[in-house]
Image (cartoon, rainbow, N blue to C red):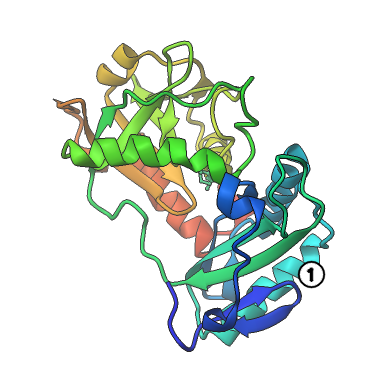
Amino acid sequence: YYNQETYIYLDGDFVKATDAGIDLFGQSLHYGYGAFEGLRAYSTHHGIRIFKAEEHFIRLQHSCEAINLPYPWDNQVLIEKSYALLEANNLRSAYIRPLVFSGSNMHLTSAKDAHIMIAAWEWGPYLGQNLLRVCTSKVQRLHPKSFHIEAKVSGQYINAILASSEAIREGYDEALMLDHDGFLAQASSENLFIEKDLKLYTPPLGNIFPGITRQTVIELCKGLNIDVVEKKLTIQDVHEADSAFLCGTAAEIIGIKEVDGIIYKEDWEHTIGASIQRKYKKLVLEEENYEVII
Ligand code: PMP
């Protein structure tokens, strides 16, 4: 993710990643009390473009507000700094990771002050480019009454790490996680869509993370006259689907080959997911005008 020459943005300055000291007595390190984002920059015909930068920084601000972490920054400035960071690191297409973390404090009380760092590095699609083998996980997602599950909060990701590492240990690529009512919510860090009889289905907001890519998929479908139904999905719905895919900024759009050993019969290239995957690529690379697609 970094070497001797890598710059990060830290509290207003660009500093060498290797020179950025870390406070060992902060709540973020000890309690996971921090919030972060994941964005992608693409090298387009019009230059370098960070996809949906504003939406991501607004979500970062909301995540901080949800857990009472101070957020004294201007999102437009942070977007400008993100572009400058890409330039400082000679990056054209990259994954961008802002992280807000608390200052020195060992109490279990709201943070008094906060720091922001933004890092960027080259990162291929998070789950690779091959169709995925996934399994339903024994690790459930956190209950919305126990946590702000709509916020991208650091500590919460231990839940995702447990689920995905269990899946990988059992020979799968990724885990599908149930909500507290036993419905399929999403993958450990991607949202889920299934296709059945030429319609897409995806779990509704409430027990899932509100992915920006999920919303983009819904908008792309509108433009293509494809019905998307937001509805609670059972394991059986997912097993009996014609096809399925995951989506997220890091993973982009990636098809699923099999769930719990049940292989989808539909050839991926002929699924709605594959057309959405192609449209998404055009959208982020600005090969087609947003207004034309949506
Ligand atoms: N679910 C979780 C738990 C995530 O962390 C992410 C990535 N931020 C997603 C889904 C996908 O969200 P997005 O499309 O906004 O990247």
Residue 63 percent across, percent down from the top left: 69, 43
Number of numbered discs: 1
Residue 141 percent across, percent down from the top left: 47, 26
Q: Secondary structure under badge 1? A: helix
Vertically, is 294 above or below 91? above
Residue underneath mark 1 = 77
Vertically, is 55 above or below 142? below
**At x 23% / y 44%, what residue is drawn?**
131
Q: Closer to the camera, 128 or 157?
A: 157
Vertically, is 260 above or below 28? above
| Res 100 quadrant in image | bottom right
Residue type, label 1: Val
**At x 49% / y 25%, what residue is drawn?**
227
Vertically, is 26 above or below 222? below
122 relative position to 62: left or right: left
Q: Closer to the camera, 65 or 255?
A: 65
**At x 60% / y 43%, what residue is drawn?**
152
Report crowding for label 1: few under 14, some 14 to 19, many 20 or more residues within 10 A (C-alpha): few
259 relative position to 106: left or right: left
**At x 29% / y 41%, what residue is drawn?**
165
Split into 4 quadrants, where in the image is the C terminus?
Answer: top right
Residue 58 percent across, percent down from the top left: 73, 50
Q: Is residue 144 visible?
A: yes
Q: Is residue 220 visible?
A: no
Q: Closer to the camera, 121 or 242?
A: 121
| Res 186 quadrant in image | top left
Split into 4 quadrants, where in the image is the N terminus?
Answer: bottom left
